[in-house]
């Protein structure tokens, strides 16, 4: 994976949502949002008895500036993840 770029994340999110504005926060109704300069790694797995490092979903975050609610967006679905073969989202060449 290349280095995460928050500007690329926001541009890809806008493209995939047809430039629709971010809707108001579902918790506080806030309308101002920010992101971070780092991605989130959401761990996935089948075991419920503990946290273990393993497969993960790289995600960009949109954060409500009023209450801090965080929305996650999978970077692979936005075309921002490249596998070892240089293919985006696991596509085959």
Image: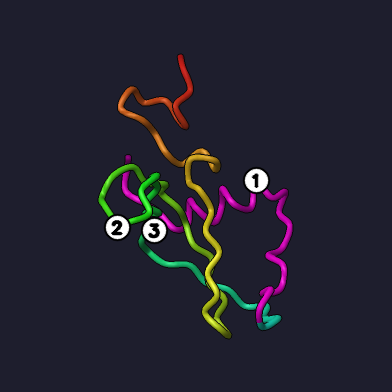
User: Which residue is tagged 3?
Assistant: 40
Q: Which residue has dot 2 on it?
A: 50
Q: Looking at this view, is 2 or 53 the one in front?
A: 53
Q: Is residue 25 magenta?
A: yes
Q: Quadrant of the N terminus?
A: top left
Q: Are marks 1 and 2 in contact (CB under 8 Å)?
A: no
Q: Nearer the viewer, residue 47 or 37?
A: 47
Q: Is residue 11 magenta?
A: yes
Residue drawn at point x = 73 percent, y = 57 percent: 20
Residue at the extreme left:
53
Within 10 Å of disc 2 (Cα), the crowding (few <14, some 14-19, many 20+) is few
Q: Is residue 36 left or right of residue 70?
A: left
Residue corresponding to mark 1: 16
Label 3 neighbourhood size at 10 Å, few (<14), some (14-19), many (20+)? some
Determine the CA span between mark 1 and mark 2: 35 Å
Residue 29: x %, y % from top left: 71, 81
Judged from the image, the secondary structure of the residue bearing numbered disc 2 is loop
**Residues at marks 3 and 1 touching, judged by CB atoms closer than 8 Å:** no
Residue extent of the magenta highlight? 1-27
Residue 6 percent location from the top left of the image: 44, 58
């Amino acid at each position: 994976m290349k280095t995460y770029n928050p500007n690329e994340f926001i541009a890809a999110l806008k493209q995939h949502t047809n430039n629709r504005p971010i809707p108001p926060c579902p918790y506080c109704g806030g309308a101002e949002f920010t992101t971070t300069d780092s991605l989130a790694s959401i761990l996935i797995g089948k075991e419920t008895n503990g946290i273990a490092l393993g497969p993960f979903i790289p995600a960009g975050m949109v954060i409500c500036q009023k209450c801090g609610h965080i929305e996650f967006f999978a970077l692979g679905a936005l075309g921002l993840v490249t596998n070892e073969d240089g293919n985006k989202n696991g596509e085959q060449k």
